[in-house]
Image (cartoon, rainbow, N blue to C red):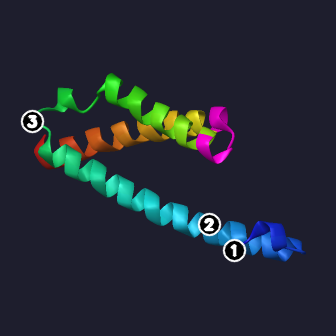
Amino acid sequence: MNPDSYTSMSEVRAGVDEIDRQIVALLDLRFAHMRAAARIKPDRGAVRDEARKAQVIANARTEAERLGAPADVIADLWDRLVEASIAYEMEEFDRTRG
């Protein structure tokens, strides 16, 4: 995939669809890590870690800046992703240990 070589919207759409499939697969893997965290953490109170949340968002922002991607947009997406991940991890913790 090379968007600079596209000459039609069908190519753009096919590229976006492929990227979306890859993103969903990576998100599935990320949430598998949340399941592992729920299994490993000693108690439910350890699920929310504000310092780690800030670090993850800062890492995403730094990588976006390095790539020339819109850093504010990426940071906002990562804030939402981390919050969704925390909620999922809490649900998993309760489901498996609560």
User: Comparing marks 2 and 1, which lies closer to the viewer?
Assistant: 1
Q: Which mark is residue 19?
A: 2
The residue nearer to you, when weighing 70 against 22, is 70
Please state if 43 lies on the left or on the right of 30 as rendered. Answer: left
Instruction: Describe residue 25's horizontal placement relative to residue 50 as left or right.
Output: right
Q: Residue furthest front?
A: 66
Badge 2: residue crowd in 10 Å (few <14, some 14–19, many ≥20): few
- How far across and how far down the image is residue 73, in percent? 65, 37
- The answer to whether the residue labelled 2 contacts the one labelled 1, judged by CB atoms less than 8 Å apart, is yes
The kind of secondary structure element at disc 2 is helix
* Residue at x 34%, y 44% (from the top left corner): 88
Q: Residue at x 14, y 39 (%)?
A: 41
Disc 1: which residue: 1
Quadrant assignment, res 10: bottom right
Numbered disc total: 3
Part of the protein shown in magenta: 66-73
Q: Is residue 72 magenta?
A: yes
**What residue do we see at 62% from left, 38% from top?**
65
- Counting residues from the N terminus, which is met first, the one under dot 2 or under dot 1? 1
